[in-house]
Image (cartoon, rainbow, N blue to C red):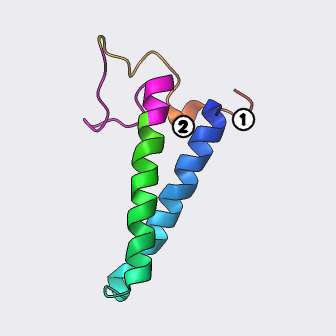
Amino acid sequence: MSRQELLLEIQQIEFVLVELQLYLDIHPLDKRALNQFNQNSNRLRKLILQYESQFGPLLGFGFSKSRNTWQWINEPWPWQIEEGC
């Protein structure tokens, strides 16, 4: 999966999770929605790990670890990546 494809899928799942979170705030007993939230949350974690292993840190503020050196500055930041990169 390319950097662009991976970022797009991460963004799509983040959107789904925000929508499910808002829904669950109003319908906390909906087991189907809770199951969807948990499945998407697990998928998001895997995608972020995949992105970071291939391209470097995705999130700042201590959410993403750097390997041997400080990697945050080595690649374009996610919001700097343009279509076709």
Q: Nearer the viewer, residue 47 or 3?
A: 47
Q: Nearer the viewer, residue 37 or 26?
A: 37
Query: Is residue 53 placed above or below 8 in the rendered structure?
Result: above
- For disc 2, the neighbor class at 10 Å (few under 14, some 14 to 19, many from 20) is few
Asked whether disc 1 touches disc 2, contact meaning CB atoms under 8 Å apart, the reply is no
Q: Residue at the location (43% across, 78% down)?
A: 33
Q: Is residue 4 left or right of residue 65?
A: right
> Residue beneath label 1, please?
83
Numbered range of the magenta stretch: 50-67
Confirm whether the magenta stretch covers residue 68.
no
Disc assigned to residue 79: 2
Q: Residue at the location (46% across, 60% down)?
A: 40
Kind of residue sitting beneath label 2: Trp
Query: Is residue 76 placed above or below 36 in the rendered structure?
Result: above
Q: Is residue 69 left or right of residue 78?
A: left
Kind of residue sitting beneath label 1: Glu
